[in-house]
Structures are given as C-alpha cells and as structure tokens.
Image (cartoon, rainbow, N blue to C red):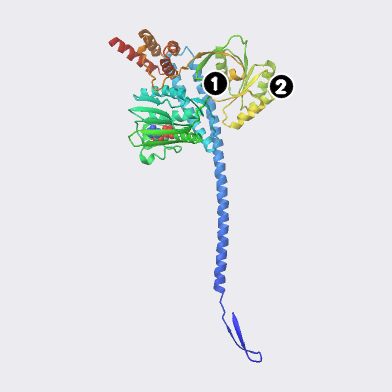
Amino acid sequence: MSQTFRAADGKPLRMIGISYDFTGRKLVETELDQHRHHLEELVEARTRELDSAKNAAEAANQAKSVFLANMSHEIRTPMNAVLGFAQLLERDGSLSPPAREKVATIMKSGEHLLGIINDILEMSRIEAGRVELRTGPVDLHNLLDDLAVMFRVRAEEKGLSFTLDYGEDLPRVVMADTGKLRQVLINLLGNAVKFTKQGSITLIARAAGTDRIAVEVRDTGIGISPGELGDVFRPFERTRAGEQAAGGTGLGLAISREYAHLMGGEISVESGEGQGSCFRFEFRAASAEAAPVAAETGRRVTALAPGQGTIHVLVADDNPTNRFLLREMLELAGFIVDEACDGPEAIAKATSGLPRIVLMDLVMPGMSGIEATRILRDTLPPESTAIIGISASAFADDERRFLEAGINAFISKPFRVEELFDVLARHAGVAFETEVIQAAAPVSSGAVDLDLSVLPLETVRELGAAAGRLDLREVREIVARFDDGHPILYAGLTRLAAEFRFDRIVSMCESTTTGNVNG
Ligand code: ADP
C-alpha cells in the first residue's frame, strides 16, 4: 500500500508507502502446504496399507476356513474307518467281554475326538457367517426328558443328584432348531457335571413371556471367579480352576452363545469362586400347533426285509479300507456287494451289472465321483440305479455339485451304519427288519428313577448276571421285557446299555438284591 504527493504541476514530490515483507509468510505457507500435501500422501498411503491389510486378513481368514475344512476331510476319512470298524466289532457276538470293553473305549474316544474336530469346524463356519437356523417343530418335554435320562446317569456316577424341573406353563411343541437347542443344553449340562465334585445339578425350564423360553442349568461346583466371568464365552478360553479340574477345548460356550444369538436369545452366567454356577439360556420359540413330534425311536437294522430279492450294491472308492468297511456293513444286512476302485471301473461295472445301488466316493484319483456319476446318469436307464454320494469333504459346495451330477442322496463321512441304512431306505427304497434299541416312551419330568426293586427279584438277578458278563445282547433282551410295564426303567436301562455302563447296571442290581435279602 502507498501514496504519492505531487506539486501543482503534477510532479511527484514524495511518496509514502508501507511495504510488507511476505518472504517469511510465503515460506510458512509453502511449508504448511508441503505438510498438508505430505499428510494427504500419508493418509492415502495408510489407507492403501489398511486396505491391503484388510484384504490380507480376509484372505488369511478364507485360507484358515479352507485349511480347516481340508484338515477335517483328512481327519474324518481315517476316523470313518476307526468308528466304522469299531461299530462292526461291537456287533460281533464272538467277541470276549474284555475285548468288547476295549472296543467300547475305541468308540468313545473316537467319538470324543470327532466332537472336537466338529467343534473347531463349527467355530470356523460361524466366523465365516455360514451357520443357519433350521427351524421345525420340537417336542420340548421329550427333549428335556431325554436329556434328563442321559445326564442323570452321568451325574449319579459322580455321586451328584440331578433334578429336572419344568412347569405346566412350558409349551410342549415349539418352533426351534432342535439340533442346536440340544447342543447348547448338552454343553451346559456337560459342563455342570464336569465342573462339579459334590452336590447337585438342576435343569429348570420355564416359559419367559410370549414365544420365549428360559432354561437354567445350576450346579454346586467349582464356580467361576468374577475376573473370569466375562471370558468364558470367548473361543478357547478356560478358567484357571476349570483347567485344573478337567480337560476341554474352551469352544463349547463360544458356540453355544453364537447359537443363542442365532435363536434370537442370549446366554448369561452368574457365578462366584467355589459357589457353583447358574447358566441361563433364553431363546425365541413360538409355540407350535403342530401334531406331536414322533418320539425318537432308536432302531437298529438287523437284516434286509424278506421279499425284495437279491439287492446288488456297487461300492466305488479308491481307498481299500473304506471299500472293505462298506462291504462288511452291507453284507451284514444281506446285500450282495461288488467293488470298484476308480471312476472308469465303476462305470464299467455299473453299466454291465446294473446294480440296484451305487455307493460313490467323491474324491478318487483321475475321474472324480462327480464325473463318474454324471456319465452313469447319461448311460444307465433312468430310475434303474440309486447313486448315493459319499464324501468326507466339509465343503457345502461339493455336496451341491454332487447332487447336480445326479446322485439320489449324500452321506458325509464318518457315518454311522444306521445312517447308511436310513439313506438306503429313504432314497433307494430298501426295506429293513429292525429291532428297538432306545426308549420311545416319554419319561415323566424330573421323576426318572432307576429303582429296580419294582421288578421281580429273579429278573434283577438275571439282569445283573448278564451285565456282569458284559453280554449286551442278553441285557437288551431282558430290558426289552420292561417296555410295556416299566417305561422309565426301560428308557434308563436302554441308555445305560447303549453306553456300555454294565458297571452301573451291575451295581444297581446288586444293591436291589442285597437290599431285598437283608430286608
Ligand atoms: P470346555 O468346557 O470344553 O473347556 P466351554 O466353552 O464349554 O469349554 O467352557 C469354557 C470354560 O468355562 C471351561 O473350561 C471352564 O473353565 C468354564 N466353565 C464352563 N462351565 C462351567 C461351570 N458350570 N462351572 C465352572 N466353570 C465352568
């Protein structure tokens, strides 16, 4: 800014001006500009880094899921052989009692291991958001009675008392995911028994407002310290006291809570160190008008039903152990079995022999089971042969592709022999003869009492002797006689026999007979 003073003729006389030196400001501005620019660059760079870190994390998570699914395939395949052969041995009448006991241990340990694998896999499925609810009518009373029979036995083995308590207001049939509901309750009850040394376990179920059910599992066990209460629902978390008391993976509660959330509910816990615990599980369950759900009638296939002629089955699997296992299972029931060790052989044998059923393994070197199925569907006369796909794959996609190729049904390994027969019955029209192995009769709430004194003394002696010889067949035959008059005893003893608890049966029989002699 400046001003000029002039003479009358207009010549400039002097000038006043103020001048600013902008150099400093310019410098500061430039510097600020550089900083701003640098900051923008930094933000961009960080955003890029975060983006790629996020992508890497997503890829790693995906890789983890794929890894877990693959590992589960690798573990399930040999597990299928272990459990399958153990099941076959279990049915072998010529086995000595000690050998039978060892087989029972193999079965138990195998199933335990499988449980752990399934938990790990389920957790990874939950993390990937791939778990869905399968809602249907559930008979709550039956479900609770069933769990009571199972856990009363386990609790009593540890000298704990067990009480089931559900009121009149508890709806009988509700809409819920029976598998998940059962799994949550088994986990809570299993923990209660596992972490309690003396006292009692109580299972309480109540209606909790409209369309909601609340179940409480209380125990008088080791409890959980206040500092650890928040952690027990996190995957792989176990309390210090819990670690010392028993083994476990620390996944059960994490899975249970995720299931509770899926069911529109929640699981919470109240506990204190040494003061027992109370786990409360609340979930949404609209009561259903549905017809009573058929009680679980565990039946065991004994043979093919007569009048069906010879039924030929072709087993296509590259693994000789798997082929042998299926052959043994099928021949036991009376099927005629042929084997193929790869896709082309399966096609050749199926097109020439026209078996009624083909059991097709998914993974075979060269031609996969899916490809072989596709070719068979194009060449075989329609409806002539049922193709059942079998796989240890944990990928839902594999099952879908197999179904698209034309299989009638899918079985995932490891499967129980009853599962195989069930699929053959439903999808290949095979009829079987069966025998009952589990109670169908409902057991009244909280009143499951294995008091054998109501039975004739001679029968109790007979039962005790059969259990003492570990003679499962004989025990089952004796227990089957109670089906009519003593449904509760029938249910409890059938369960004990199925779990090979001959020791419990013997001790119950002994205490009844001794009591009678003394009294
Ligand atoms: P797991 O029992 O297989 O270790 P869970 O997720 O079911 O896994 O339980 C996590 C942990 O929470 C247990 O290891 C135990 O420390 C603690 N916990 C669960 N239930 C109880 C209970 N009823 N009493 C005391 N501690 C419990």
Q: Quadrant of ligand 1?
A: top left
Please say whether residue 365 is visible from this viewpoint: no
Residue identified by numbered label 1: 419
Quadrant assignment, res 206 = top left
On the image, the x and y values in percent for residue 370 come to: 65, 27
Judge depth for marks 1 and 2 and give the one in front.
1
Quadrant assignment, res 409 = top right
Instruction: Indicate the quadrant containing the N terminus: top left, top right, bottom left or bottom right.
Output: bottom right
* Mark 1, secondary structure of its residue: helix
Q: Is residue 269 left or right of residue 7?
A: left
Answer above or below: position of 188 versus 301: below
Kind of residue indicated by mark 1: Glu
Q: Residue furthest bottom?
A: 8
Q: Is residue 338 left or right of residue 415?
A: right
Q: Residues within 10 Å of mark 1 (few under 14, many from 20)?
A: few
Labels 1 and 2: the sequence-earlier one: 2
Report the Cα–Cα distance between label 1 and label 2: 29 Å
